[in-house]
Structures are given as structure tokens and as C-alpha cells.
Amino acid sequence: MNKTAMVLGATGLVGKAVVEELLRENWKEVRVLVRRPLALRHDRLKQTVADWERLERYGDLFEGADAVFCCLGTTIRKAGSQQNFERVDLEYPLTAAKLARKAGVRQFLAVSSMGANPHSRQFYSRTKGRMEEALSGLGFPGLHLFRPSLLLGEREEFRLLERSAAWLMTRLDGLMVGRAAKYRAIKGETVARAMVHIAAADPKGLHIYPNDVIQVLGKDFAAEAPPAWEDEKGLQ
């Protein structure tokens, strides 16, 4: 894959999976902006420890990138206040998007949330909706907004409410059919694969991907394929 990617939020659940998927899919170069270095080492991985309060200093790192994956996100509890939450989930993504647009990046892919709505009464959903609205006004040739349900996977920090919700959702998964299927919890790696698959396809325009669509786009077909040695054995 002769493309260069920039990943924001690479230490998070989805962001880390995006980095791993990009390397697995042989993207030419994977750049990440992080508060602290990833333990992952790879010759195609370029890490920059950044001061997010001075993100404008790193505008040159967006030059030559084909796609930017924005996986930034926190919780109000971790952020400490609604103001700090907005900084991470709204201001940082928008600043990065403006830098990317100025640098000529053609694709911007962002993790939003189910229920995102700039007019929502819920602060979380309203903030995500405001982010989507702001990004859509920047004029990217390709803007892709992913709205997953509850994310499943191992996080670096412990989130009690999410851990409890994940436990419940995984046990109810088999019952969530029909209209309820769109609310099924989803693995962070599934969201990551969906994002990378879309970036590789490079569709133009604004696209919003709900949870059930992400489940399909992020399906790991390779994991379902029979091992190569079985194929060869069958041909002998």
C-alpha cells in the first residue's frame, strides 16, 4: 500500500488497533502523535511525542499524509470537567483537521459515537455531534465519521462503568436481533479494520457509518479463511 497515514489517539483502544492494522496492511508509513511513546516498534512507524495544547507546532507532520485517522476520546470522569472533555473530544480533533486540510490531506476518518447530535440534550452526544458538524464544514474530499456503540477491548486505564456495561452487553449479544442489532457492543479492532478498509477504498464525499455497518465493514475475513496448508493439501 503506497500510502502514508497519520493516527491521532494511537494509545487508545481503537487508535492502537488502527496502527496495528495499517502496519499489517503494509501502508508505506504510519505516523502517530502521542503524549507518550507506544511500546510498538516498527520500521514503518514514526512516532512524535506532542504537546496537544500546542498542536499547531506539528503542522508539517501532516504534509504528505494520504489519510488522517482521528481516534481521540476520553471520559468526563477522566477529563475532570466538561470543559476538559470538550478540549479532547472537540477542540483537538478540529485543530488537527484544520492542519490536515491545510496540508492537503484528502481523507479524514474520525471515531464519533452512536447518537451523535449537535442538538442532543446529552452533553456527550452533543459534543460528538458538534465535532461531526465542525469537521463537515472543512471541505475534505473524503470525510468518514464512524459511530460505534459500546466499545469492547482491553484499555490501558480501568473504566468501571464501561467494564460493567461490556460484561452485560456481551451476555445479551445473542438476544440483540432485528432493530436491537444496531446497539450491539463492538470490538475496538473491528472499528479499526472498518476505518482502514474505507481508507484503502478512498470513497469521496461525506459518509457516516452507524454501528451495524461498521460491524460488516470491519469483519475479519482473513480470520475465517482456511489455513494455507489446508488449501495446498487439498490440491495435492
Image (spheres, rainbow, N blue to C red):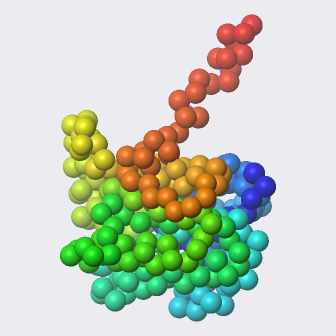
Total labels: the figure holds 0
**Is 64 drawn above or below residue 35 in the view shown?**
above
- Where is 3 relative to 81, above or below? above
Residue 176 can be seen in this image: yes
Q: Position of residue 59 (x, y in %)?
A: 68, 84
Quarter residue 85 falls in: bottom left
Q: 172 and 109: which one is in front?
A: 109
| Horizontal and vertical percent position of residue 1 | 75, 51
Determine the residue positioned at 25% across, 37% down. 177
Image position of 70 with respect to 99: above or below: above
Quadrant showing the C terminus: top right
Foreground of the two, 213 or 36 = 213
- Residue at screen point 71% across, 75% down: 104
Q: Is residue 44 left or right of residue 80?
A: right
Which percent across, then down, holds residue 88?
Answer: 44, 81
Decide if residue 221 is on the left or right side of residue 168.
right
- Tell me the residue at 47%/53% (across/down): 191
Q: Is residue 16 visible?
A: no
Residue at image x 43%, y 72%? 132
Residue 64: x %, y % from top left: 76, 71
